[in-house]
Image: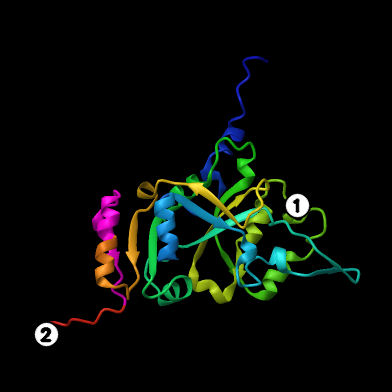
């Protein structure tokens, strides 16, 4: 019929919030630690840079690409993630020494804050006919090695979650990580693009609107921090949300 209305359920599936995994809420604040040079690139180029998970160090980070599957005595290789790009964030608002040391440095690092909504909308492309299966933000699920392997049993058989046509089966697998890293409380943004041959995919953003707060590393040079703060303020960032970490500042006690 000419007057037939579109199915409401199919329309709803095209909203970015439908592609949040792990009970994430749109207004949830998330944080990312990064070296100062990458932060500068993000600000000046106005780009969010996602990379292929295959370049990550931990062999269990992207086990779908790096694991070996043996069937009937023969090794079977498959790579369902080769077209995905990812970026890592954390739900942990309280500072952690491990984040500064592992993901930037104690002197040349920056922590930025945004929300889940701003992150999913940064990568979401309304013009992409396959956006429903191409863009996700999800909370990482931490598991033991045995449980990770258990999840992969039957991965070559029809009906396994990896064959889910919604694409969420592969994405959910990419949101699994070894329990040794549980302290990170990680959130990942994932974007699929088979049209480019690069280790990185860039998304245009307005940094002033995307970033809610900026914190410089605890051992950042005070003079340089003030210069950075003034420069960022001149670019439109609210100076009251630009700070330097006090994680290693000496205590000042006032005694009666």
**Residue displayed at 68% across by 48% down:** 194
- Cα distance in 3D space between marks 1 and 2: 65 Å
- Residue 186: x %, y % from top left: 51, 64
Magenta region: which residues? 229-247
Tell me if residue 197 is in the magenta stretch: no
Q: How is the image coloured?
A: rainbow
Pointer 1 local density, CA inside 10 Å: few below 14, some 14–19, many at least 20? some
Looking at the image, is mark 1 or mark 2 earlier in the sequence? 1
Dot 1: element: helix
**Residue displayed at 51% across by 48% down:** 203
Q: Quadrant of residue 224?
A: bottom left
Residue farthest right in this picture: 72
Dot 2: element: loop
Res. 255 mark: 2
- Residue 217: x %, y % from top left: 35, 71
Residue farthest bottom in this picture: 255
Q: Quadrant of residue 232?
A: bottom left
Res. 163 mark: 1
On the rendered structure, is 203 left or right of 231?
A: right
**Quarter occupied by the C terminus:** bottom left
């Amino acid at each position: 019929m000419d007057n037939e209305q579109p199915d409401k359920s199919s329309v709803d599936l095209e909203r970015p919030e439908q592609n949040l995994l792990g009970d994430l809420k749109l207004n949830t604040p998330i944080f990312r630690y990064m070296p100062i040079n990458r932060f500068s690139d993000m600000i000046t180029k106005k780009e969010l840079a996602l990379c292929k998970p295959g370049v990550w160090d931990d062999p269990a980070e992207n086990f779908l690409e790096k694991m070996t599957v043996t069937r009937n005595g023969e090794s079977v290789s498959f790579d369902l993630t080769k077209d995905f790009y990812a970026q890592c964030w954390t739900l942990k608002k309280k500072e952690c020494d491990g984040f500064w040391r592992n993901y930037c440095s104690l002197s040349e690092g920056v922590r930025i804050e945004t929300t889940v909504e701003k992150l999913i909308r940064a990568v979401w492309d309304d013009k992409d006919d396959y956006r429903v299966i191409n863009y996700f933000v999800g909370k990482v699920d931490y598991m033991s090695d045995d449980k990770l392997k258990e999840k992969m049993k039957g991965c070559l058989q029809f009906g396994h979650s990896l064959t889910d046509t919604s694409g969420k089966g592969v994405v959910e697998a990419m949101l699994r990580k070894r329990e040794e890293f549980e302290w990170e409380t990680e959130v990942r943004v994932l974007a699929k693009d088979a049209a480019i041959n690069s280790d990185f995919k860039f998304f245009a953003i307005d940094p002033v609107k995307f970033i809610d707060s900026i914190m410089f590393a605890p051992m950042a040079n005070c003079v340089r921090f003030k210069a950075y703060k003034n420069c960022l303020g001149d670019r439109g960032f609210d100076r009251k949300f630009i700070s330097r970490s006090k994680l290693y500042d000496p205590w000042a006690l006032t005694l009666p």
